[in-house]
Image (tube, rainbow, N blue to C red):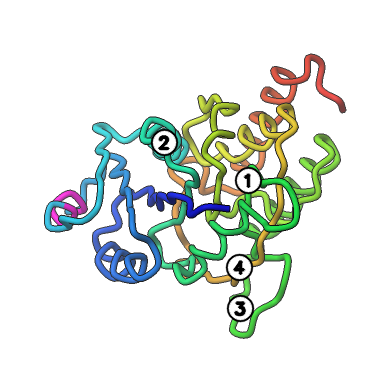
Amino acid sequence: MPAFRTLTALPVYNEANHLVPVLAEVRKYADEILVINDGSTDGTAEVLSRQTDVQIITHDPNQGYGGALRSAFLFAQEQEYDVLVTIDCDGQHEPRLIPELAAAVFPSDVPPVDVVSGSRYLKSFAGDSVPPEERRRINVEITALLNDTLGLNLTDAFCGFKAYRVPALRHFDITELGYAMPLQLWVQAAAAGLRIVEFPVPLVYLEEERSFGGSLDDGRQRRAYYLEVLRRECERAFQPCRK
């Protein structure tokens, strides 16, 4: 296939301490970079003002993780990129994998893939972290429920390191702006019959006590939130839900 244009997008919220080293590493593997500054209050905007070679979208006020990705989706479509790669800015994803993840959208021997989703549990790597027990347990439960409900074959429902075939982004209507956005995405992808593959990525946890915000820091409430979003999105997409 001819060369394809790839946009690498980083949703950012209060990442002033990580932003410079992460961008320096991303630049080694990505020609075009978009940063979505999602209402940061910690000096992130000042750091970004010195980054002359990246495109920037600023949310004021904060919209949430899903809102930042929605802006990346819209931008990639408006600018007619071929592939959108999303990568977090907390140092837990390895930018060296950006070219491989993007290339996996257009394999040589099969039709294009719509969503290439990083998985921290598809393969073990030397030096993998041990995930926080509660977060791993919730991930396993929700991933299994997605597979059972939607007929998917995922091993990691929540990894933010992904590559999308940009024309396929038109199938997504992102209204869930928080951390449950991936559940809405998976339901809509399944309903649209999108082609999905997983891509093994290392398991890295640098901040095990990362906050999800407010009541979602409580695992029971976060689990209930995920289940409610999944129920609602499934019923909306399939009317009634398959399960």
- Judged by depth in the image, the label closer to the viewer, 2 or 3, is 2
> Where is mark 2, residue-wise?
80
> Where is mark 4, residue-wise?
201
Name the mark on residue 63. none
Q: Residue flagged by tag 2: what amino acid is it?
A: Glu
Q: Residue flagged by tag 4: what amino acid is it?
A: Val
Q: CA distance from mark 1 to mark 2?
A: 17 Å
Residue 159 in percent (x, y) is at 58, 54
Question: Between disc 1 and disc 4, whose residue precedes?
Answer: 1
Secondary structure under tag 3 reads: loop
Q: Residue flagged by tag 3: what amino acid is it?
A: Asp
Q: CA distance from mark 4 to mark 2?
A: 27 Å
Residue stretch rendered in magenta on the structure: 44-48
| Residue at the image position 48 percent from the left and 70 percent from the top | 94
- Judged by depth in the image, the label closer to the viewer, 3 or 4, is 4
- Judged by depth in the image, the label closer to the viewer, 3 or 1, is 1
Residue 25 in percent (x, y) is at 35, 71
Question: Between disc 3 and disc 4, whose residue precedes?
Answer: 3
